[in-house]
Image: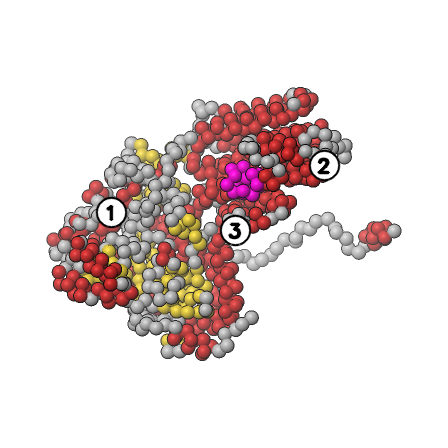
Amino acid sequence: MLSRIAESLFWIGRYVERADDTARILDVQMQLLVEDPGIDEGEACLRLLSVMGVDADGRQPTRALLLDVLGTDPTSETALVASIAAARESARRARETLSTEMWEAINTTWRAIPSGRTSTMRPPQLFAWAKERAAVIAGIADSTMSRDDGWHFLVLGRSIERVDMTARLLSTAALSHGPKVAWPTTLRACGAYEAFVRTYRGMEADREAAEFLLLDRLFPRSVVGALNRAEESLQNLESSGRRSGFSTEAIRLLGRARTELEYRPLGDVMFDLPTEMERLQRTCSVATDAISQRYFATVGSVSWMGGLA
Amino acid sequence: MTRFADAAEVLKAYESASARPTYDEMVVGGRVRPNYAAVAGAYIEMGPDELRTRGDALASSYLDQGVTFGVAGEERPFPLDIVPRLIDSTTWSRVDLGVQQRVHALERFLDDVYGAGEVFDEGVVPRSVVMTSPHLHRVVAGITSPNGVRIHVAGIDLIRDADGAFRVLEDNVRVPSGVSYVMTNRRAMSAVLPELFADHRIRPVSMYSGKLLAALRASAPAGVADPTVVVLTPGVFNSAYFEHALLARTMGIELVEGRDLVCRGGRVMMRTTAGLEPVHVIYRRLDDEFLDPVQFRSDSVLGVPGLINAARAGNVTIANAVGNGVADDKLLYTYVPDLIRFYLREEPILDNVDTWRLGDADAREEVLDRLDELVVKPVDGSGGKGIVIGPSASRAELDELRTKVLADPRAWIAQPVVSLSTVPTLVESGLAPRHVDLRPFAVNSGDEVWVLPGGLTRVALPEGELIVNSSRGGGSKDTWVVADAGDESEDSGLAPTYADPDGAPRDSGPAMGDGSAQEQQQQQQQEQ
């Protein structure tokens, strides 16, 4: 398929997932702030911003700022609504390859932003909406797209983003020292609470919760689950072409990250979870570069000139 | 729900709203024309509130689907009016034949211009008319596609005059756009007004993409058994990007930008995730000047360096052909009836609108005397740009026009103010007559020129406005060509055949309770 289209699909996958996960992360944080009166709001907000790679720029770190910067301000690159807009723009550029239903699902989601709907929603409503729209888009993709290269690029983007964002989510939980509510809330935000409770027979413990979100092979939002999915898509992309002689750097990077999680004693990983998670985020970024080099790099960066019929 | 009080009242009010001596396509002398009877009845029955509700449903479905066109970089939904325009099959067959005839003549003309030039030798068209055209590209002389087609797609703009006769307003044989709205309008209307569709036998439009793809494949370079066809778009910021994407999607082919293509050894390749792959036919939606920076504008970043050479080497077909613009400027337009007589030895089926060429001294003198009652158009304008409508122009505008005409007479033509026909249209105050034109689309495969039944009806939404272009507040209407009993079926050939239904038993899940003893006992347990 066209390199440019492959790139668009990869980024649709990433942006939709990013919107979804941003909603989940914000959800956790807002609930923690409400449920635990002992928390220092300023410090907690600052920590989350830093985990999300945002500089507070001297602004007062409040819940309102979090909601703005990570939620509803369309001019903020890290905002949930900006991810939706970016997904829609990628979709517009790949429109002829998307099914009509898939395009409409993305387009109607985006239309809620300029129409002002997202800015009037209450936070929990906004998060629920974002998660639901992401699920609708993923579901329609799942049931209307052929399992060809385009599909694998979409899933690859989604999986890498999920690894990155779940890593940030785990950092957030690990950093909010003390409160017993952090892990159950995190599990709930991932839709993992029931799965976790069933798997561990109700034995709630921080360690097990982290283990579940990191390593569970059967749960689709776990880091290892997403890494596995990304590797699978890359392998599918590799075997479908006549491309021997190229490096498969991305598979190597993702495979190494996964085995490091799986084969090291959990205690090692948990000892300094935030640092481990930052490493994982960096791996995602390097793997994305490798994928761009490998599949998209042939596209020159020419810009459009105006003025024709 | 408000209903229209009385049908006759409605018609009277409607008709009095039309001041000019125009041809209204639905109403004449306080009566509904027979072909509109079912539509008029249904709309009067529905009443303005219901109509508006359905109109809103139409608009929001277009926003959800992203059926838009770009104006100054902004995406706007393309307005679709809820009242369709009907054309009966007898009237249509004349339009169909007339459009075919026109395309055949223009094909012959282009072949002649870039070849022997008989048309000049015989004195049918002065050589200067073509030689002074900015769209004449000598560089493409000698490049012909294997099946000889240059006009793969034509959009011939028609209007209906005060007598109801269709006349040609202009020919578009470069990159005519709008066909995507014909297809989306139909889908949207059938969703919102299913009952009306049931009352009419409307000729379908969905086979356009199949016809276009077949025509493009038929013009592929010789010896390519399974040609790769692509649509070339200027990119996502182009006003017609929606259309480019829709055509590519419905034909199941790649939509490429210039930067996706590269020429190697006289061949055109596209960059894919599996390396470079050959391209054989390019349906380009890019102006000539931007196609190949080696041959035309060197600053074009939209095109593909080396494309023209690849076409000359016979390795790729460009559709529509480069240089077609000499056949569709408004000056050449005035000669088309003569071209039909010269090449085809036939009389034109569709008349032109009467036109003065301001390059002719006599005509110029007459027109300059009557500027305030005529329409003056630049020969090379599109989208209604530069047109001056005499009766509604100010003194100063007319003086400015006079200066421009005198400075470059060849660049202008003049026409009488033609009273475009009207069709009822839903506006603030209810149904009101609004002016329309029609752009039928023709696809030439080399074996036949096929005309899409209907085409794009554009409607001028502001009252009294005669320019229907979308950049001037124009909208569109679904255009129905009503089929005769004798018309053969026009489906895509993909219609399934149904065997007698003989379904297998349905699977069902685990029992959810049937009032059995077990269930009753469970309920009792809960009550304790």
Query: As rendered, which of A42 and B109 lies closer to the eye?
Result: A42
Q: Secondary structure at mark 3?
A: loop
- Between the residue at mark 1 and the residue at mark 3, the CA separation in whole angstroms equals 44 Å
Q: Nearer the viewer, mark 2 or mark 3?
A: 2
Left or right: residue B498 versus residue B341 is right
In the depicted structure, whether residue A290 falls above or below residue B513: above
**Per the image, is A76 magenta?**
yes
**Per the image, is B204 magenta?**
no
Q: How many marks?
A: 3
Query: As rendered, which of A258 and B58 lies closer to the eye?
Result: B58
Q: How is the image coloured?
A: secondary structure
Determine contact: label 1, label 2, CB under 8 Å: no
Chain letter of the residue beneath label 1 in the structure image: B
- Between the residue at mark 2 and the residue at mark 3, the CA separation in whole angstroms equals 35 Å
At horizontal 51% and vertical 37% (from top left) the residue drawn is: A77
- Between the residue at mark 1 and the residue at mark 2, the CA separation in whole angstroms equals 73 Å
- Assess disc 2: are there few (<14), some (14-19) or many (≥20) residues with their C-alpha within 10 Å of its C-alpha: some
Left or right: residue B348 versus residue A284 is left
- Assess disc 3: are there few (<14), some (14-19) or many (≥20) residues with their C-alpha within 10 Å of its C-alpha: few
Query: Residue at label 3?
Result: A115
Query: Residue at label 1?
Result: B323
Q: Position of residue B506 (x, y in %)?
A: 66, 53
Please state which amino acid type lies under the numbered disc 2. Asp
